Image (cartoon, rainbow, N blue to C red):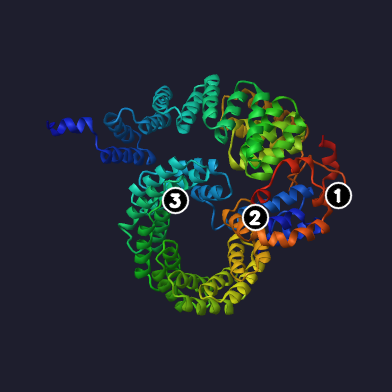
Amino acid sequence: MTLPSETTGRFLPSVGRLENTMRAARRAFDHGDLEGALREDDVAIQLKPEYDAAWLLRGHIFRKDGNIPGAIEAFAQALKINGESQEGWLGLASALHEVGRFEEEGEAYDRLLKIHPRSIEAWIDKGAALHALGDYREAIACYDKVLGMRPEHAAAWNNKGAALLRLGDDAGAARCMDEALHLDPDFYDAMANRVLLYRKMKRHGETVFWADRALRFREAPWLWYVKGTAHLGLRESTLAMKAFERALALDPKSKEARAGLRKAKILHQTKDFYRGVYECFGTLLVGDPGCEECEIRARCREVTT
Amino acid sequence: MSLPSLAEVEHSDWPSLQRMCETLGLNPKGRSAIVRMRVADYVRHRAHPPSWRPAREHQAALLTRLGHPDLAERVWESTIQLEAPAPWVGLGHAQLAGGFLAEAAKSFARAAQMGDASGELHRAEALAAGGDYQGAATACEAYLATHARDLRALLMKSSFLARSGFEEEANKVLHTAAELHPEVALIRRTLGFALLRTGHHAAAAHALQEAVHRDPKDVDAVVGRGAALLLAGRTREAIGVLREALEIDPKRADALNNLGVAYLAMGRTKSAAVNLERAAKHRESPRILLNLGKVLEEAHEPAEAVRAYEQVLKLRPKDSEAVAGRKRVGVSAKARRTPRKRVASPRKAAPTTRRKTTPSSEATTS
């Protein structure tokens, strides 16, 4: 019996056509043409409904397009077809993270870790999910797993530092951040965490220094605000005003920044210290050769905490 | 102006740091740690980035070699593209290193399907590692369909055929390889030994002669040729060739043994015994000792022959040839030696009860 050509085509889709369609979809996705990618991906799914790669791509397209529920559904479908897909579990977990479903996200990582117990991505992301849920000790255990496998993983050191900071272990947090910044001196997140640590310790000089470094990489209103309050602590009202003004420019609704600006203006009427070329102002270290030669040493001693 | 290295910046003292700041046009004021960081930042951002960074493919290949096939497998998987066969080859190697032979064979097959013919050769290796030599030979054949002259594939095919029991076919493949690559002396040598193993002595002698012609110092080939001539019944020629071999390396035990056997065949028992004794000195092999025993038997030196057979039995306690040899010549030798032994060794003169009740084979024969 000979089947008509369209019938054979329907039941036996050409592998070549399927691969061409997938290739076109990927190309469109890589070029940012989400609509075109989705169109080609639809064709691929019609040709082979049980094609996990096509569902994965669909998940990525939806995720990039901001359609998170659609992305979750697509990744789940891909995992129904191939439950061992690392890409599928990671995609599903990150989509769940974006909608704040951290517990389910953690479960997704657990499933992935059963299949790939040495997946660095899964361990570090599971740690981040647990951190978001407030389970800092378990999060630290995840980061330790990563550091056991990859001691040079700067992000794991940083995340561990952030979790220790939350647990109140400032010395441990400082050590972890040191490691992270030693491994990657331009690591923004580690710099930002250091700012938070020094702010907590009320070490204004260091807070300003690290906030400046972090702001060179990325501006954030909260960083400007923290920098402004640290300048207030150092009695640098002009610099504090500038920082609060910048914070307000980035986030005009910030009440804290507005209040800080008011305080800075009041301080400005009585005190305003000018640090000049000393970006380390407020971090005096007795016996340090640089500090010994410093021209504003006396003033620095006054404000160093 | 040359930049200092990061290590220099990290370890330099305060005056050096200040000099660096001066040279680089940086602010030298402030706490030393801060100044150091300033210089380090400058150096890091201005130093040339390394010209080469390992891509994921490189990392995966290194991981396989460093003994982490599981990690390598995952990295290779992440590099797979629709039309690139190379990651499949890499993945196959990682799977092979991890002991997943069937998966490795599949990955190599995938690479071959994608147009990388060498995938078939890799598949052959994976199949052979799993003991499927016939499958391995077939995979080599698939590769040779497009690369008929490829020496590596020809030699691999021949080796796999021989290991799967098709020795004649293996020899034919070696013949083809030798004809296609007359410039490679090694093939003639390999062919010669293969022919020797399969009993084609005359052909083996011819192939090995060609190998020796190309490399007269190839002592293995010379010795092999001597053995081939000896087995082909051309004893005189064999003696000449084996002597040549011993001129190159006088300590070659196999050449001495073969020469001994050749002399024995010619009826020159004494020369045979001398060569075999020398061979036994260089290598205590049961075969050489058995040959020596036989020669000594023929030379009517039963005590020495028994000693040779007993030496074999020390190495291989149940060797049938040695047991038979000792039985043949043991009576007369024992008759002469026993009284001396009883006097010389008091331990033997005081046997245990168990020994008394368990007759030895020697006692039975006597």
Q: Position of residue B3 (x, y in %)?
A: 66, 61
Label 3–label 1 contact, CB within 8 A: no
Q: Amino acid at mark 3?
A: Glu
Q: Which mark is residue A292?
A: 1
Question: Looking at the rendering, in which quadrant would you find the N terminus of chain B?
Answer: bottom right
Q: Nearer the viewer, residue A97 or B121?
A: B121
Residue drawn 24% across and 34% down? A13
Q: Nearer the viewer, residue B339 or B204?
A: B339
Which residue lies most toward the right here?
A287
Q: Secondary structure at mark 3?
A: helix
Decide which of tag 3 and tag 2 comes sooner along the chain.
3
Q: Secondary structure at mark 1?
A: helix
Left or right of B17 in this view: B244: left
Comparing labels 3 and 2, the label whose residue is closer to the camera:
2
Comparing labels 3 and 1, the label whose residue is closer to the camera:
3
- Residue B1 shows in this picture: no
Judging from the image, mark 2 belongs to the subunit labelled B
Up/down of A106 relative to B45, above or below = above
Which residue lies most toward the front here?
B366
Q: Amino acid at mark 1?
A: Glu
Residue drawn 76% across and 38% down? A205
Distance between the alpha carbons at the discs numbered 2 and 1: 89 Å
Q: Position of residue A132 (x, y in %)?
A: 60, 23
Label 3–label 2 contact, CB within 8 A: no
Q: Which mark is residue B2?
A: none
Q: Which mark is residue B125?
A: 3
Judging from the image, mark 1 belongs to the subunit labelled A
Pointer 2 residue? B313
Q: Nearer the viewer, residue B156 or B81?
A: B156
Q: Amino acid at mark 2?
A: Leu
Label 2–label 1 contact, CB within 8 A: no
